[in-house]
Amino acid sequence: MNANKILQQLMQQASGSQKGGGVDVKGMLGGLSKQLGGSSSDGKSSGESAGGFDMKSLLGGGAMGMLVGSKRGRKLGGKALKYGAIAGVGVLAWKAWQSSQNKSSVSEPQDAGEGERVEVLDGEYQERRSLELLQAMIMAARADGHIDEQEQAMITEQIDALGADDEMHRWVEQQLNAPLDAKALAREADSPQAAREMYLISVAVIDEQNPMERAWLDQLASALDLPQEMTVELERQAQQAG
């Protein structure tokens, strides 16, 4: 399975850049919205903002767009889409921990018992963390119950376009249909840092104003055994990152 490759490309798309050139994430999402029959928030055709739309060319922008931007009732490009929190999930979760410890700089060593950031892990450890974060994103995206079969198929297609291998393809399909279980997800976290990253990336995907999505975040925080002051700080970091 190549979970780390998929997560890294999603993070690059979220930051608005990709190796080999810049990526217009909002434009891609506009094109995806048109494919789903929607329109951009300024009233123009989504295709106009995308400057031409080709499903195969969306790559990670399309996959991420399906996860964070296609749900009913959410406007593309709105404040609910926290791209910065996805792009910097490990560092932001680390900063939240440091803030709780009254630390001043992310350059200070993290307590060994807290675990490492996803960005500095390697090998099987990075692969495992990447899979955990992808699982958290998918579950958060499903928290309002509004990903239908067509949207599931498009998410899978976009993940495939990122280069998912056969095992990864089957795993994504399973996650899109698996029961939402915060406790089962939380059991995947192998360190406090992993737990914080899982919560933060979930915050990046959901709309806290949606009661069902807010309830999912609360369930996840409880399952991850995160103190309220930590969840507040993680949500603050996500909002600041935008």
Image: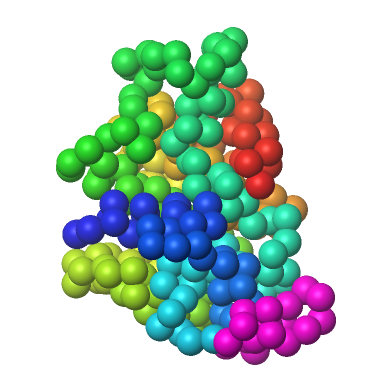
Spot occupied by residue 174 in the image (x, y as percentages of width and height): 31, 68
Left or right: 45 as drawn, with respect to 26 = right
Magenta-span inclusion, residue 37: yes
Front-lying residue, 55 or 222: 55
Residue 178 visible somewhere in the drawing? no
Left or right: 120 as drawn, with respect to 49 = left
Q: Residue furthest front?
A: 20
Q: Which of the 4 quarters of the picture holds residue 175?
A: bottom left
Which residues make up the magenta segment?
33-52
Give the residue at x 48% y 87%. 54
Left or right: 177 as drawn, with respect to 88 = left
Look at the picture and state if 224 lies above or below 173: above
Spot occupied by residue 86 in the image (x, y as percentages of width and height): 51, 49
Q: What quarter of the picture does the N terminus occupy?
A: bottom left
Q: Residue furthest top?
A: 102
Q: Considering the whole magenta stretch, tell me its main secondary structure.
A: loop
Spot occupied by residue 19 in the image (x, y as percentages of width and height): 38, 58
Specify how the rendered protein is coloured.
Answer: rainbow
Magenta-span inclusion, residue 112: no
Give the residue at x 69% y 64%. 77
Front-lying residue, 34 or 107: 107
